[in-house]
Image (cartoon, grey):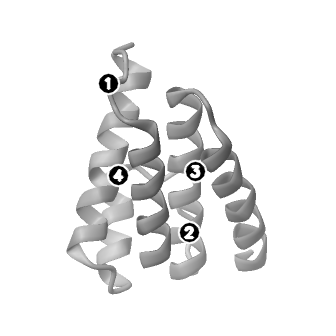
Amino acid sequence: ARQRAKQELRTSKTAAQQAKVADHFYAQAQSAIRLAVTYRSGENHRTANIDTLCEAMLSTGISERAISQTRRLFTTADALRFAGKESKSDLPKAKSELEGILKAL
């Protein structure tokens, strides 16, 4: 299961970095983070909410900084998806933050 999570993580990470549209990027970024936590923790977090993810990240020794960046990324993604808000976020900056989060994981 961990190997499969690692393979899926590579796919999601690549898709996120190649995304040209914010909503596609954020969907892939959320998936990549969930898969990275699944891989690191050995527990299935593919559909976990942000609170569960942050708890798992904390228990596996992830830095507070990476956890707060993850929380911010998920908040932006949810606002974009559920509130239909236009994303004013800077996509290259968001991609860079995702890279940092995944390296921490």
Residue at point 45% right, 38% down?
A: 91
**Callout 2: helix, strand or loop?**
helix
Cα distance, mark 2 to mark 1?
Answer: 26 Å
Cα distance, mark 3 to mark 1?
Answer: 21 Å
Asked whether the residues under the numbered discs 2 and 1 touch, taking CB atoms below 8 Å apart as contact, a structural biologist would say no
**Callout 1: helix, strand or loop?**
loop
Residue 42: percent from left, percent from top? 58, 80
Cα distance, mark 4 to mark 2?
Answer: 13 Å
Please name the amino acid that badge 3 sits on: Ser
Cα distance, mark 3 to mark 4?
Answer: 12 Å
- Does 33 appear above or below 80? below
* Direction from residue 89 to residue 43 in the image, left or right: right
Cα distance, mark 3 to mark 2?
Answer: 9 Å
92, 73: nearer the viewer: 92
Please indicate, yes or no, whether residue 46 appears anywhere in the rendered image: yes
Q: Residues within 10 Å of mark 3 (few under 14, many from 20)?
A: many
Asked whether the residues under the numbered discs 3 and 2 touch, taking CB atoms below 8 Å apart as contact, a structural biologist would say no
Mark 4 or mark 1: which is in front?
A: 1
- In primary-sequence order, the first of circles 3 and 2 is 3
The N terminus appears in which quarter of the rendering? bottom right
The residue where tag 2 is placed is 36
Please name the amino acid that badge 4 sits on: Ile
Asked whether the residues under the numbered discs 3 and 4 touch, taking CB atoms below 8 Å apart as contact, a structural biologist would say no
The residue where tag 4 is placed is 50
Mark 4 or mark 2: which is in front?
A: 2
* Direction from residue 89 to residue 37 in the image, left or right: right
Residue 44: percent from left, percent from top? 58, 66
Please identify the quarter of the rendering in which residue 8 is found: bottom right
Mark 3 or mark 1: which is in front?
A: 1
Cα distance, mark 4 to mark 1?
Answer: 21 Å
